[in-house]
Amino acid sequence: MLRAALVLMVLLAGPALAATGGDQVNTSHGEAYSRAWCSACHAVGRGEAAAESSAVPSFQSLADNPELTEIALHAFLNTPHRTMLNVILSPDQADDIVTYILSLRHK
């Protein structure tokens, strides 16, 4: 049931967000995609922490890891993982999500 709801959210959110975009990387779109597709398992907001017992990292912890580069995040998003939903991202969507994650990095 949860998976069906997530798929429906992706189908509904994707075209609407794509229609408002352009060719530029967009942090607000990345946040919207993250909330629609990733928030069922990940804490995606600035400062949100994952549950201590959870093996799923928060986006904040990803952003604050200095070893996670833009290239590493792109590679991760484009590699299938058995514990993640099989969401296929367009290059623009992946760019937006990576930009959003990196925008959370503490300066």
Image (cartoon, rainbow, N blue to C red):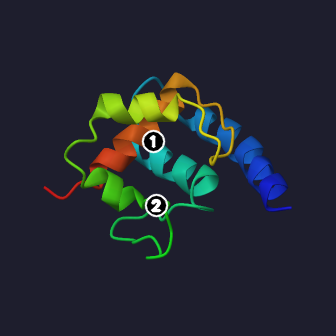
- Quadrant, the C terminus: bottom left
From what the image shows, is residue 10 above or below residue 43? above
Q: Residue at x 18, y 59 (%)?
A: 106
- Give, as a three-letter code, the residue at label 1: Ile
Image spot of residue 20 (x, y percent): 56, 37
* Residue displayed at 35% across by 65% down: 46
Q: Quadrant of the N terminus?
A: bottom right
Residue 94, x across and y down, in percent: 49, 33
Identity, as a three-letter code, of the amino acid under mark 2: Val
For the point 47% across and 45% down, the residue is: 30
Q: Is residue 5 left or right of residue 53?
A: right
Label 1 crowd (10 A; few <14 / some 14-19 / many >=20): many
Q: Is 61 on the left or on the right of 66, as rendered?
A: right
| Residue 27 vertical position relative to residue 89 in the rendered view, above or below | below
Residue neighbourhood size for the residue with mark 2, other residues' Cα within 10 Å, grouped as few (<14), some (14–19), many (≥20): many
Residue at the spot x=58%, y=26% of the render? 90
Residue 72 at x, y percent in the picture: 34, 32
Residue 87 placement, left or right of 98: right
Residue under label 1: 97
Badge 1 or badge 2: first in the primary sequence: 2
Secondary structure at numbered mark 2: loop
According to the image, label 2 marks what residue?
A: 44
